[in-house]
Image: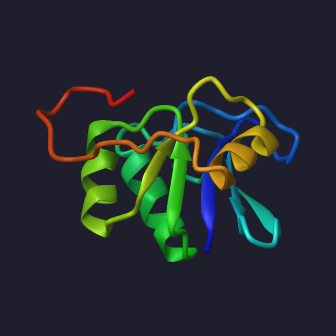
Amino acid sequence: MKIAIALEENSYNSLTDRRFGRAAYFILINPETNDYEIIENEAKDETSGAGLKAVKALVNLGVNEIIAGEIGPKAAVLINEFEIPVYKMGELTKVSEILKNYKENKLEKYDLSPKPQGLRMA
């Protein structure tokens, strides 16, 4: 099991980033062992399609679930196609808080069913 969470900085103690596709980093964490690695989001500076490229990179790294603040509509379509569950981080800003709430099944799941283009899912 591998979960991706967007981060502002390259640190476990970094604040989370609500912007999925434009986040500077992702932490990939195994919720069972708490083992993790932090990767740079190489798509963050793309002029368009940052979320799509981020999703593809995370899938290639074996991510099974995503916890996010905001998911853009294009990224949502691709996530839905890959059938990756996405949970809302809500107002949580620390990885440790998010992980605790995840393990206690307190995070709300995003509804990524197809919606009209141009709507943000927050």
Q: Which residue is nearer to you in this view: 20 or 105?
A: 105
State the image coordinates of residue 57 (x, y, percent, origin top left): 51, 65
Residue 118 or 91: which is nearer the viewer? 91
Q: In the rendered view, would you say 7 is above or below 120? A: below
Identify whether 79 is placed above or below 18. Answer: below
Q: Quadrant of the C terminus?
A: top left
Tally of numbered discs: 0
- Decide if residue 15 is on the left or right side of residue 55: right
Up-down relation of residue 4 to residue 74 (above or below): below
Residue 77 location (% of width, % of height): 24, 51
Q: Which residue is located at x 23 percent, y 26 percent?
A: 119
* Image quadrant occupied by the N terminus: bottom right
Residue 27 found in image quarter: bottom right
Residue at position x 47%, y 39% in the image: 108
Q: Residue at x 41, y 37 (%)?
A: 47
Q: Residue lying farthest left?
A: 116
